[in-house]
């Protein structure tokens, strides 16, 4: 299974419980379809590079988080559809890091 990275920007004024629920539902969707979640990284609230209009509101701040996972490309498509309609998500993107975890472990940008 290919190894992916999901980078997501959620609304900055979300209650902590809503943010945890968003992350939990994203992870469980991957797990229920046979994928493997490798880890999360919370980057916290930051100002956006430019003003974003999403769900009929303008946003200037967002809460950034990242998830690493192994999954079938069909799982990524389904998760993409769910995140597009979720009102808590401002922007998201999937990055394919490699076809196998072994090829990604020795990443040149992560030196020892």
Image: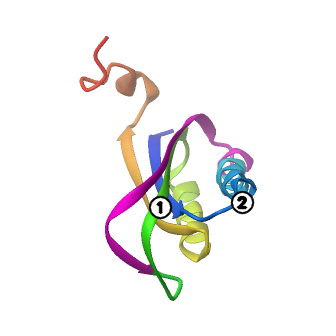
Looking at the image, is mark 1 or mark 2 earlier in the sequence?
Answer: 2
Frontmost residue, 5 versus 46:
46
The reply to whether callout 1 and callout 2 are in contact (CB within 8 Å) is no
Which residue was labeled with disc 2?
A: 18
Q: Main secondary structure of the magenta part?
A: strand
Is residue 67 covered in magenta? no
- Residue 45 point in image, percent of width and height: 49, 53
Q: Residue furthest bottom?
A: 56
Of the numbered discs in the image, which one, if any, rests on residue 62?
Answer: 1
Residue 27 percent location from the top left of the image: 66, 47
Asked which secondary structure carries label 2, the reply is: helix
The picture quadrant where one finds residue 18 is: bottom right
> Which residue range is magenta in the image?
30-53
Location of residue 86 (image quadrant): bottom right
* Residue at x 35%, y 25% (from the top left corner): 103
33 magenta-colored? yes
On screen, residue 45 versus residue 96, left or right, reads right
**How many other residues sit within 10 Å of disc 1, few (<14), some (14-19) or many (≥20)?**
many
Report the label total.
2
Residue at screen point 55% across, 44% down: 71
Q: Residue at x 71, y 55 (%)?
A: 25
Picture colour scheme:
rainbow
Q: Is residue 89 left or right of residue 21?
A: left
Determine crowd level at label 2: few under 14, some 14-19, many 20+ residues with C-alpha closer than 10 A. few
Q: Residue at x 31, y 11 (%)?
A: 112
Could you tell me residue 104's position as x and y percent? 37, 27
Work out whether 60 lies above or below 22: below
**Residue 26 versus residue 97 in the image, above or below:** below
How many angstroms separate mark 1 from mark 2 (CA)? 14 Å
**Relative side of 3 to 21, left or right:** left
* Residue nearer the viewer, 56 or 100: 56
């Amino acid at each position: 299974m290919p190894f992916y990275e999901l980078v997501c920007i959620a609304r900055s004024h979300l209650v902590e419980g809503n943010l945890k629920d968003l992350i939990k539902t994203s992870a469980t969707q991957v797990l229920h379809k046979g994928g493997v979640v490798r880890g999360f990284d919370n980057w916290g609230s930051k100002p956006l590079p430019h003003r974003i209009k999403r769900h009929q509101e303008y946003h200037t701040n967002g809460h950034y988080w990242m998830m690493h996972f192994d999954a079938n490309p069909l799982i990524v498509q389904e998760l993409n559809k769910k995140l597009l309609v979720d009102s808590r998500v401002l922007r998201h993107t999937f990055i394919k890091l490699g076809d196998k975890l072994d090829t990604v472990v020795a990443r040149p940008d992560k030196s020892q």
